[in-house]
Image: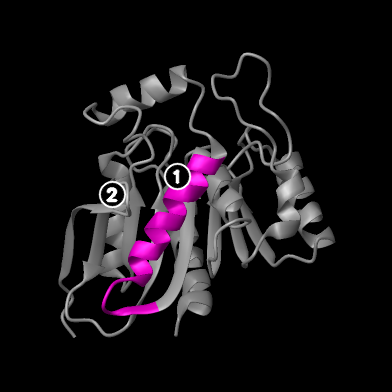
Amino acid sequence: MSDAIRAETVFIGDEQIQAYQAWPIDAGAVPGVVVIHHLPGYDDATKEMVRRFAANGYAAICPNLFWREAPDASPDDASAFVRGQGGIADEQIIGDVATAAAALRGLDNANGKVGVIGHCSGGRQSLLVSTAVELDAAVDCYGAFALDAPPAGFPLRMTPIKDRLPDVRCPVLGLFGEEDKNPGPDEVARLAGVMAEQGKSFEYHSYEGAGHGFFAVDRPAYRPVAAVDGWQRIFAFFGRHLSA
């Protein structure tokens, strides 16, 4: 089988949402992954993650969650604008991820299974959409404010999603840093407890010496040992739940 991939900007759904998509060329039936970008936006680092999934046998897509608010802005400027507006509404994010998942299932070589992954704000959103979109697996990488509201003065208006957790529809993997403040270890432990109380499949791992953003290769927070192990866990998790 060829190891070639194709990657390009596409426009999906009735609204023609801008998205970045990558998929293996000349592959058989493949699973899909929706990549939710972090608050810094629809940036090169996130697009590299999309290509990484394609290189490992997945069709992957990242919808630009900020395209309505700042359609022609750079990722930094779009993120600053959205931050100034208090963020993107949860229901809008759910709708855009549902559109992206449908686009993946509509590919000619789709196996019909789709997962979702997000980092930072995208981690919370990955958990959020698992309660409302038909998905087969979800990965939450250090998503904060699932259980508690942000502190006073925080630039984003995010409401806790604890009341939505009984509706989680798929297995969830959580990857966290023990030195993170949002979410801190106590919040992670409480989240695990709530998921267990609701009978949800939630496996998680917290990395010693890692803080927020340890997957981000272009940032000082990057921790290669934690990131390498985290990617191994992600591909093992998706391999179990997204294979035909």
**Residue 211 visible in the displayed image:** no
Q: Determine which quarter of the picture holds residue 57.
A: bottom left
Q: Position of residue 143 (x, y in %)?
A: 58, 43
Q: Main secondary structure of the magenta part?
A: helix
Q: Is residue 205 above or below residue 69?
A: below
Quickly name the residue at label 2.
Answer: 19
Q: Position of residue 210 (x, y in %)?
A: 54, 42
Position of 185 compared to 222: left or right?
Answer: right
In the rendered image, which quarter contains the N terminus?
bottom left
Viewer-closest of 61 and 194:
61
In the rendered image, which quarter contains the C terminus?
bottom left
Residue at 40%, 43% in the rendered image: 37
For label 1, the SS is loop
Q: Position of residue 75 (x, y in %)?
A: 29, 31
Residue at 37%, 71% in the rendered image: 105
Q: Badges 1 and 2: C-beta atoms under 8 Å apart?
A: no
Determine which of the numbered discs, if any, sits on residue 11 in the image: none
Q: Is residue 104 magenta?
A: yes
**Residue 54 visible in the displayed image:** yes
Q: Give the CA distance from mark 1 to mark 2.
A: 28 Å
Give whichever of discs 1 and 2 has the lower sequence position: 2
For label 2, the SS is strand
Quickly name the residue at label 1.
Answer: 223
Residue at 16%, 64% in the rendered image: 6
Extreme-top residue of the structure: 153
Count neighbours of disc 2 (C-alpha within 10 A) and say few if under 14, some if 14 to 19, many if 20 or more.
Answer: many
Position of 225 compared to 27: left or right?
Answer: right
In front: label 1 or label 2? 2
Q: Which residues are magenta?
A: 91-111
* Type of amino acid under label 2: Ala
* Type of amino acid under label 1: Arg
Q: Position of residue 60 (x, y in %)?
A: 33, 62
